[in-house]
Image (cartoon, grey):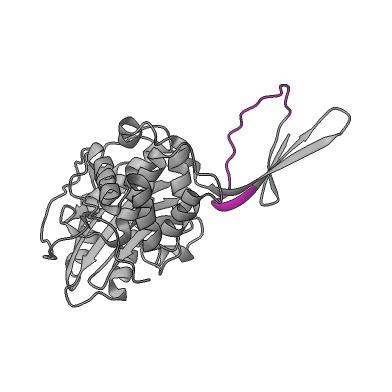
Amino acid sequence: MLVFANGKRLVSKPLHDRRFTLRVNLPLGDSTVRVVTIAHGGRRSSAHVRDVFGLPAASRPRIVRSRLDRTLQRKLDPQVRGYEGTAGYYVQSLTGGWGAAWNAKARFPAASTVKLAIAATVLSRSAGIPAPGSYVDDLLQEMIIPSDDAAANALLVWLGGSTTSGAYRVNDLMHSIGLSDTLMYGGYEVVRSLSSRIPVRVNEAPAFGVGKYTTAWDMTSLWRAIWLASGDMGPLRASRSGFTAADARHLLWLTARVRDQPKLDTTLRSQRGVEVLHKAGWISTVRHDTGLVFWSGGVFVAGVMTYRSWGVSLSSDRLAGRVAAITLRRLRRVEG
């Protein structure tokens, strides 16, 4: 048997049974996988598997104890505290546990970041991964990839019969994994628990009235729960039996296709061997990005949130990019 990814041969192995299991180290990023079998006499058959997204073997999901990296904290705190407005962040290696945080429990207007929670709720309640081209599949792709608000509202209605009832179901999922500082408040206006030894607290919080809110801690915890669920473990799998490992991997695959102004990936996108899966959120007063950063040595989760009552700008995106780049440099030193 032969296994190819994007035309490059990865495996050549004799088989003796009709059923087999293989672990293959795929290249990082999008791939088309071709499996070729050769019978006695030279007769060949092959199959293509498209839409495969390879990630480093070192990033395989595992449960790790969180540990404060004081050096990383000293590097990141001035970046975030120096933001002209209100900001907060949380970063943690999901490979070794090292991380840092500042103002990570402060509530910010959530904007589109909680669409990740909507998607997780939808997948937990659907019978398997939605069929390609189906109503729910189309809406999930529209909500996650271009961040369409109308698609998010339609999925909330699909969940509960109305955007309000659907929002209750999303809040219930968040609460079930111990995240109490996130509120899905109705739908969108369409114009177009894992414990932590990394201190998470409120240092300063914006005043923004009634509406959807979340925190850097809650959103990074949701990303971590989805990542663990992709390995059939963690709080989301335990609390939502309907959210399977396949559902988690499908949601991660969707986030790998997000089209957005560079944020966490501002500088990392130019580095070979690095991939960023993320979901951002923005309105006139806030600009956030949260996601997973993969590199050859593993994976870390990052969330950066910013608020300015007089309006945010690209400086928020650049801040997220600096936080991710500094974290990656530090983890390469401590985790190799």
Residue 81, quarter of picture: bottom left
Image coordinates for residue 278, horizontal then vertical, percent: 39, 56
* Residue 138 part of the magenta-drawn span: no
Image coordinates for residue 230, horizontal then vertical, percent: 43, 38
Residue 89, quarter of picture: bottom left
Quadrant where the N terminus is found in the figure: top right
Q: Nearer the viewer, residue 197 or 233?
A: 233
Q: Is residue 162 above or below residue 174?
A: below
Image coordinates for residue 203, horizontal then vertical, percent: 10, 58
Residue beneath the point at 34% across and 51% down: 156
* Residue 18 part of the magenta-drawn span: yes
Q: Is residue 249 above or below residue 262?
A: above
- Left or right, 326 with respect to 33, comes to left
Residue bounds of the magenta highlight: 14-32
- Left or right, 131 with respect to 150, comes to right
> Can residue 95 be spotted in the picture?
no
> Can residue 50 be spotted in the picture?
yes
